Amino acid sequence: MSFTITKQGDVSIVEIDGQLIVGNRQELKQKMLEALEAGARKLLVDFTKTGYIDSSGLGVLVSLSKKIREQGGELRLAALNEDLRTLFELTKLDTLFQIADTREQALASF
Amino acid sequence: MTSPQELPPQGRTLEFEIPSDVRFIERIVDAVRAECRSHRFDERHLALNVPVALTEALSNAILRGNERDRAKLVRVRAVVDEIRLVIEVADEGSGFDLETSLRDPTTPERLMAEDGRGLFLMLRLMDRVERVPVPGGSLVRMVLHRAS
C-alpha cells in the first residue's frame, strides 16, 4: 500500500496503490491535508491501482472533501473499477463526489 | 457454530487469533480471500464482498469491541466450502445490538458523516449477518453464499 501525490498543472493527483482501509486512512488524510496546506486547491484521487476501500476509507474521503471545500478547493475522483463504483453507489457517495471514468476526463473537468 | 457434519468433505476451516491491532486485518482478509478463491467464489465476491465485510467486522471488533486494548484478542473462524463462506469474528467486548446500531448512512442528513457505514456495508455485502452472544464477549457471524 502506498500513496503518491504528483502535480499536473495546478492539479494535485493522489494515487492510492493498494487498499484504503482503517489501518492507513490517516496517512492519506495527512498527505492530502499537507498538500492543501501547501496551497493545493484542485485535488484528484486516482483509483486505478486501488484494491478495496472500507467504511473508514470512505469516511476519510468525505472528511477531506469537506475540508477541501472549506478552503475553496475541489476534490474529484477518477478511475474507480466496477467494484469500487458499487461501493460508492451502495453508500450513495456517488451523489456527493464528482467521479470521472478516467484521470484525463477528471483533469479536463477542473 | 457450524458443525463439522454439515460441511461437505472439501470444506476448509481457517482460524486466527490476533491482538487488537488494525495492522493484522489485511493478512486475515488475504488468507480468507485466497481460500474463497480456491473454492471458486466469483471475482466480485473476492474483490468486494469478502474483503470489505470482513474488514468491517475486524475493525469493529478491534476498535469498538476491544477498544484497541492489545491485551484483548480477536478470534476469527472462517469456514469455506463449495456452497458458502461462514465467518465468525469474536471479541472480548460487550457487543452491540445490530438493529439499534444500524442507522441508514445514505439519508441526506447522514451522507456527509465520516462514520456510520460499517454495519450498513456488512449487511449489504453479506447474505446474513447476526450477532451471537458468547461468554466473555461478542461474536458476529456472517454468511455469504457462493454465486452459482
Image (tube, rainbow, N blue to C red):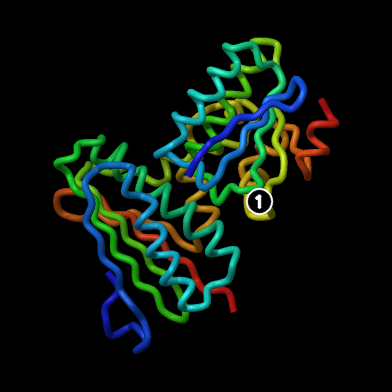
Q: Position of residue B65 (x, y in %)?
A: 27, 41
Q: Of all residues shown, which one is farthest toward the right?
A: A108
Q: Position of residue B28 (x, y in %)?
A: 35, 57
Q: Residue at x 35, y 60 (%)?
A: B141
Q: Position of residue A60 (x, y in %)?
A: 52, 30
**Residue type at the position of mark 1:** Thr
The residue singled out by tag 1 in the image is A86
Q: Position of residue A108 (x, y in %)?
A: 85, 31
**Nearer the observer, A109 or B109:** A109
Q: Tell me where residue B35 sits by quadrant.
A: bottom left
Q: Would you place residue A35 above or below residue A19 in this image?
A: above
Q: Tell me where residue A72 sits by quadrant.
A: top right
State the quadrant of the C terminus of chain A: top right
Q: Tell me where residue B110 sits by quadrant.
A: top right
Q: Residue at x 34, y 83 (%)?
A: B7
Instruction: Answer left or right for B66 relative to B118.
Output: left
Q: Would you place residue A27 above or below residue B48 in this image?
A: above
**Nearer the observer, B148 or B10:** B10
Q: Residue at x 19, y 39 (%)?
A: B70
Q: Of all residues shown, which one is farthest toward the bottom?
A: B9
Q: Would you place residue B43 above or below residue A33 in this image?
A: below
Element under disc 1 = helix
Instruction: Answer left or right for B128 relative to B67.
Output: right
Q: Residue at x 22, y 42 (%)?
A: B93
